[in-house]
Amino acid sequence: MTISTIRNLENSFTEASLEQQKNSPYCTLTWRRGKLLVRPVGQQKQPYLPATNNKESLVECLEHSPVNLVLIDPELGFSKVKLWADATSAAGKSIYLSIPSLETSKRNPWEWCQVILNWIVAFILLMVLSPVALGLTILMRVYSPGSLFTREWYVGKRGKLFQVVKFRTTAINKNVVDDFCYQNNLLNTLDTNYTLIGNLMRKYGLDNIPLLLNILRGEINLFGRQSIKLEDAVKFNPEKLRQLNKAPGIAGLWQTASESKLLHLDSQPL
């Protein structure tokens, strides 16, 4: 086992209190059988590795290391955890939040059946909705140029971090949308933070179609605990972090904002 300390953001380091350590530019790295543990700096003085000030250099380090999995402490804060998450993703490595394990580790005998059912339902829905997704892609290319998708980090089963992909609904150039809505008397009917197509997608939940790919990859289930964003998970206490051992469900993410309120999925835990 090897322990070192590495700086991952630009700043000078000073030994200080625990509160100051949380904002420290350094973190403690521990190698254990192909796993890299990333934690806040402890009280013990340790040698420092050369500074890693940006994502590109961190990606290069991870690509040339024997590490297969990164286990990172949520106490490092959202910005640092996200930096490592982006870097491990670019390097083709897996990353998990370091969370307390559940007291009962009883294996569900129907787990494989649930996985197969999730995969079958997601595949069928993807086939049915693929023409809709293709149509939305074309409309976005014509009327809302820019990136097609948005990506956000969520916490999966046993703390594994994964990216949720959705169709982009926000405006790249908000001024253009505001002018169009003003000229067509639409300011009171549309949320101008979103594109015209984005408002339509959000109304019927069509921006969530790419979430079916997360099910096919086994990152999320059809039904499960509430899906938690990374930026929220790093603020959890140990008891709440323990609940992240369970698999999240897609139902809490697939919400609609229909004015009729006829189609709405509650975001609370199922």
Image (tube, grey):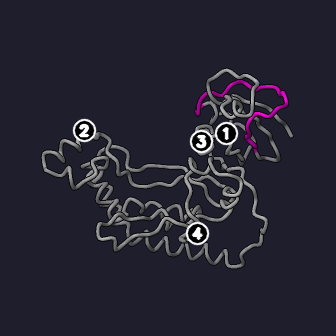
Q: Give the range drawn in magenta.
A: 36-56
Give the overall secondary structure of the magenta segment. Answer: loop
Q: What residue type is labelled 4?
A: Gly
Q: Quick check: is 230 in the magenta stretch?
A: no
| Residue drawn at 37 percent across, 51 percent down | 168
Is 91 located above or below residue 51 in the figure?
A: below
Query: Would you call the spot at circle 3 few (<14 residues within 10 Å), some (14-19), or many (20 or more)?
Result: some
Task: Look at mark 1 in the image and give the residue it sits on.
Answer: 76
Q: Identify the mark nearer the N-term, 1 or 4.
A: 1
Task: Look at mark 2 in the image and give the residue it sits on.
Answer: 175
Q: Which amino acid does label 3 sit on?
A: Phe
Q: Identify the mark nearer the N-term, 2 or 3.
A: 3
Q: Identify the mark nearer the N-term, 3 or 4.
A: 3
Question: Distance from label 1 to label 2 (Cα)?
Answer: 37 Å
Task: Look at mark 4 in the image and give the residue it sits on.
Answer: 224
Q: Quick check: is 48 in the magenta stretch?
A: yes
Q: What residue type is labelled 1?
A: Leu
Disc 2 + disc 3, Cβ < 8 Å? no
Question: Distance from label 2 to label 3 (Cα)?
Answer: 31 Å
